[in-house]
Amino acid sequence: MRFSTLGLQANIVAILDSLGYDTPTPIQQAAIPQVLAGHDVMAGAQTGTGKTAAFALPLIQRYLTTETSDKAIRVLVLTPTRELAQQVHQSFVRYSQGLSLSAVVAYGGASINPQLDALNKGCDVLVATPGRLLELVIKQYIDLNSLQTLVLDEADRMLDMGFITDINRIIKRLPESHQTLFFSATFNDEVFALSKTMLNQPKLIEVAERNTTATQIEQRFYEVDNQRKAALTAYLIGANNWQQVLIFTRTKEAVDALAKELKKDGISTAPVHGDKSQGARDRGLEDFKSGQVRALVATDVAARGLDIEQLKYVINYELPYNAEDYIHRIGRTGRAGNTGLAVSLVSHKEKYLLEGIEKLTSEHYLLQWQEGFEPNPEMQEATNSAKRKPSKKNMRAKALGMKGNNKARTGRPRRRS
Ligand code: AMP
């Protein structure tokens, strides 16, 4: 299948040729004709599937082929994070090079003035995070009366991040009749409830099974004590000679601590989280992309929207509290048909999080030990007894003499009990 068969006009296909895009991805095949026809769309699409082009290309064409009397914002794309906003904006710029379309990006945590300057020069497509968008509207820097299409990108994440009130306030300010495109990597009741309030007879598009992880990603799970995670991370990167690794932690503190440890081990590392200035975050990402640093350590929020071509390795230094974040995290690798490896380090206390992920993905994962980093059962026992009374399961294990069972500590993969 070619892009031209989806109804895209020659000048857009020529741009895609120049970018080396030969074949539309499944989400592009399904979504482009529907968006071109003006339908509302509800799409379940994982990161790395080409979903940005799936909405950007037909919207660029619709913009170029429909006449309006005034110069006003016609397309609004809402994204949960500034990184994703930047990435989507860059995509619009790339996909419309040489065409008369102006795309502007606006997000919080950065001075509003350059964004206002860009808006004042004329804006056809605005990509924004919800908070900054509301600020622009409330202060009457922009109006959305001529809006034709609203895109909600990564709707599940927007809800996770508590943007529901902002989204509802924004929707109230849009003209009665407009097209809405709703993209979400995962679906739950909350996401469905929001989609119902926003969409009008939507075309449903699903290119991968809901809540499943992308298939070209190999997933490995190492059971390891918390105290040894940093050493295991450094070992995996060093021993396997991984040159570009994205590492996730749950907190900003853990990002900083791990980055420090990895640097001590001689692995060049950039920490990225919400307390870093935008400049520092951009620099970290650039250095990572250009290969100047080997490891990028980030929180879920900071990593959202990072588009790094051919990223091969992702390490979950800590499992996320929200199982759906696991899908987002590992979706950073194996992008656009490439293969990837996602390694998760699972401490004893995190096993319940792994169970949550298994439930969500309907898969069973094999927990293995890395030789030299086997978990210490005494340590686990100590953590357990310090925290709570022994569970029935532990008492039974003790009664069966399973405490300190060295036989299982061979480094070979084993099934989790
Ligand atoms: P996305 O899911 O929108 O974040 O896109 C993931 C990556 O795939 C980006 O680096 C895009 O540049 C790339 N991409 C999107 N569509 C295509 C295509 N049809 N052919 C090749 N690469 C693509």
Image: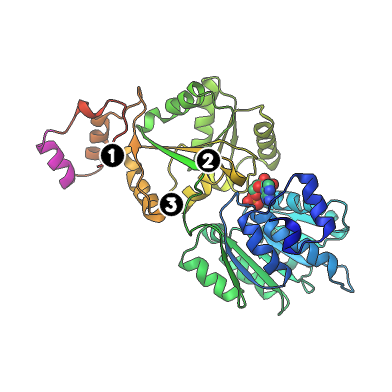
Mark 1 beta carbon near ligand 1 (under 8 Å): no
Q: Amino acid type of disc 1?
A: Arg
Q: Dividing the image into 4 quarters, which one contains the C terminus? A: top left
At horizontal 47% and vertical 64% (from top left) the residue drawn is 188
Q: In whole angstroms, how far apart are the C-alphas of marks 1 and 3? A: 21 Å
Q: Which residues are magenta?
A: 390-401
Reply above or below: 84 against 395: below
In the displayed structure image, the side of residue 120 where residue 4 appears, left or right: left
Q: Which residue is mark 1?
A: 415
Disc nearest the viewer among 1 and 3: 1
Which residue is under mark 2?
252
Residue 114 visible, this orientation: no
The secondary structure making up most of the magenta span is: helix
Instruction: Tell me residue 61's x, y (percent).
Output: 80, 63
**The label number, if any, that marks residue 323 in the structure image:** 3
Q: Residue at x 35, y 47 (%)?
A: 364
CA separation, marks 3 and 2?
19 Å
Total count of labels:
3
Asked if residue 92 lies left or right of residue 291, the reply is right
- Residue drawn 54% across and 30% down? 259
Does 92 sit above or below residue 63? above
Give whichever of 55, 18 is nearer the camera.
18
Q: How many residues crowd mark 2 within 10 Å: few (<14), some (14–19), many (20+)?
A: many
Q: Amino acid at mark 3?
A: Ala
Q: Is residue 21 visible?
A: yes
Q: Position of residue 7 (x, y in %)?
A: 75, 64
Q: Nearer the viewer, residue 331 or 160?
A: 331
